[in-house]
Image (spheres, helix red, strand yellow):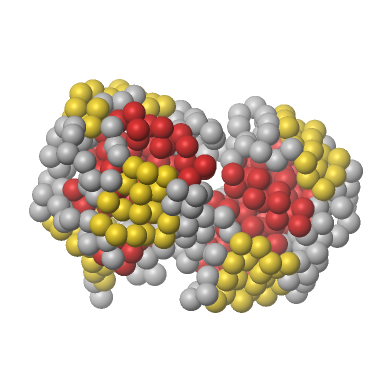
């Protein structure tokens, strides 16, 4: 991946057509981690070909797992049996935040795990103390050596864990570990995202005993062994929501296919309230062309089934085109609003009240600018802004966008967008 690559976008093009949603990034990474606690090979289909998946597969390969990745077929087969290494270096841990999930599988296989401090997007403090506490409650002893955490456990056992705050990744992490810990684990105030239900269904198909996934209380009875098998990654609701927002933003007829509209009910409600036009089918959502003004709307992010934080930035771009004042309240991450400065450089009028709240005045025409993508979701928001801006927008640091969106430039071009990937040698 060449970090000198950038997108060049010429805005204001007429868009129309069909765009298919890929497998969910936030399910794919967890399924890869879960495959490591199975005793047979696992084949994952509908695997998105994105940078974060490539990093995660590279990481588990360094642990000795046998990985067969068919990029064109969007399938990955993981055989965890040859695993021989329980150390995740600082560099590997920094490359992807989901690396923290691998401590459980390593403890299951080796009774030991070493990991450097995990990285990921720079969207505010994302402390790992929840994970550390959870692993200790499972019976692991922990030592901190500089920036490395060492865990040892002769016998993982079930436990009761009450989450002080709802955490999706910590819920999934403990779900995976508990599946092979001795006895019963009860998770309270657990996250209820669709990806958690999908993960539990996958593990249960392999022989795990998980009940209550999708509710705030999950009970897991540990088992001694798990089979392998084949499972499809669910469609990416964040990508689907991004494309639906794109249709509303560009006033285009775009059919978003291979999605689960039920996972997007909150976003669709907000799109309806703002005045966007769309139709919903079983596995598709189609935005319609319209000529009326959009209405300003206050939004507040919340854990599922609330307004998803990962669509806050794209929706804020949409709010720059609505008439009146909108308040955007980001309740999940405190560093997630700083991209608003980039939109202001393009001609938006956004006042950042504090790290969690911004007032968006609209409508304002956006002008093309040269920008850097700060993180995955703000990066895609910059792409959306570039598509409606007058003139040319250059977006650098697109490796961030590639972490979450497969070949986004190629797929947007198929809708009529003027976007090209330029690589400086």
Q: Which residue is the extreme one toward the left?
A: 391
Residue at image point 52% right, 75% down = 73
Q: Position of residue 155 (x, y in %)?
A: 88, 50
Quarter of the image with the C terminus in it? bottom left
Q: Is residue 353 left or right of residue 59?
A: left
Q: Is 289 situated left or right of 179 in this image?
A: left
Q: Position of residue 93 (x, y in %)?
A: 57, 56
Quarter holding residue 309:
top left
Q: Is residue 387 visible?
A: yes
Quick one: 297 or 35, which is closer to the camera?
297
Seen at 34% across and 42% down, the residue is 278
Residue 209 in the figure: left or right of residue 419 = right
Question: In terms of image quadrants, where is residue 334?
Answer: top left
Q: Is residue 149 above or below residue 352?
A: below
Image position, residue 421 (x, y; %): 26, 67
The N terminus, quarter of image: bottom left
Residue 160 located left or right of residue 17: right
Report the front residue among 238 and 330: 238
Q: Residue at x 89, y 43 (%)?
A: 183
The number of numbered badges drawn on the structure is 0
Residue 348 visible within the image = no
- Residue at 51% x, 66% y: name it: 54
Name the spot of residue 349 as percent of width and height, x first: 18, 31
């Amino acid at each position: 991946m060449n970090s000198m690559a950038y997108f060049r976008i010429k805005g204001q093009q007429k868009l129309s057509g069909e765009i298919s949603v890929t497998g969910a990034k936030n399910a794919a990474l967890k399924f890869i981690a879960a495959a490591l606690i199975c005793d047979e090979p696992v084949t994952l289909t509908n695997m998105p070909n994105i940078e974060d998946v490539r990093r995660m597969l590279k990481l588990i390969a360094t642990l000795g797992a046998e990985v067969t990745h068919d990029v064109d077929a969007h399938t990955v087969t993981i055989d965890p049996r040859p695993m021989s290494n329980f150390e995740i270096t600082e560099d590997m841990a920094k490359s992807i935040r989901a690396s923290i999930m691998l401590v459980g599988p390593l403890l299951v296989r080796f009774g030991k795990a070493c990991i450097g401090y995990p990285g990921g997007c720079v969207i505010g403090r994302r402390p790992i103390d929840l994970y550390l506490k959870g692993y200790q409650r499972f019976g692991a002893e922990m030592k901190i050596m500089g920036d490395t955490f060492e865990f040892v456990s002769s016998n993982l056992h079930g436990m009761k864990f009450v989450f002080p705050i709802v955490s999706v990744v910590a819920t999934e992490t403990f779900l995976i570990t508990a599946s092979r810990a001795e006895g019963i684990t009860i998770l309270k105030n657990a996250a209820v995202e669709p990806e958690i239900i999908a993960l539990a269904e996958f593990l249960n198909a392999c022989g795990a005993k998980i009940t209550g996934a999708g509710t705030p209380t999950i009970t897991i009875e540990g088992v001694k062994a798990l089979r392998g098998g084949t499972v499809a990654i669910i469609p990416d609701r964040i990508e689907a929501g991004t494309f639906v927002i794109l249709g509303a933003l560009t006033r285009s007829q775009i059919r978003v296919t291979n999605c689960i509209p039920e996972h997007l009910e909150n976003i669709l409600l907000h799109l309806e309230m703002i005045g966007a036009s769309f139709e919903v089918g079983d596995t598709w959502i189609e935005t319609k062309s319209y000529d009326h003004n959009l209405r300003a709307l206050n939004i507040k992010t919340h854990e599922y089934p609330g307004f998803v934080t990962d669509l806050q930035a794209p929706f804020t771009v949409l709010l720059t085109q609505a008439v009146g004042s909108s308040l955007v309240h980001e309740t999940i991450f405190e560093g997630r609003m700083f991209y608003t400065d980039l939109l202001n450089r393009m001609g938006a009028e956004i006042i950042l009240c504090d790290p969690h709240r911004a007032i968006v005045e609209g409508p304002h025409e956006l002008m093309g600018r040269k920008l850097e993508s700060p993180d995955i979701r703000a990066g895609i928001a910059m792409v959306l802004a570039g598509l409606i801006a007058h003139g040319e927008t250059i977006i650098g640091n697109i490796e961030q966008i590639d972490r979450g969106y497969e070949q986004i430039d190629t797929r947007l071009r198929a809708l009529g967008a003027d976007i090209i990937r330029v690589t400086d040698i």
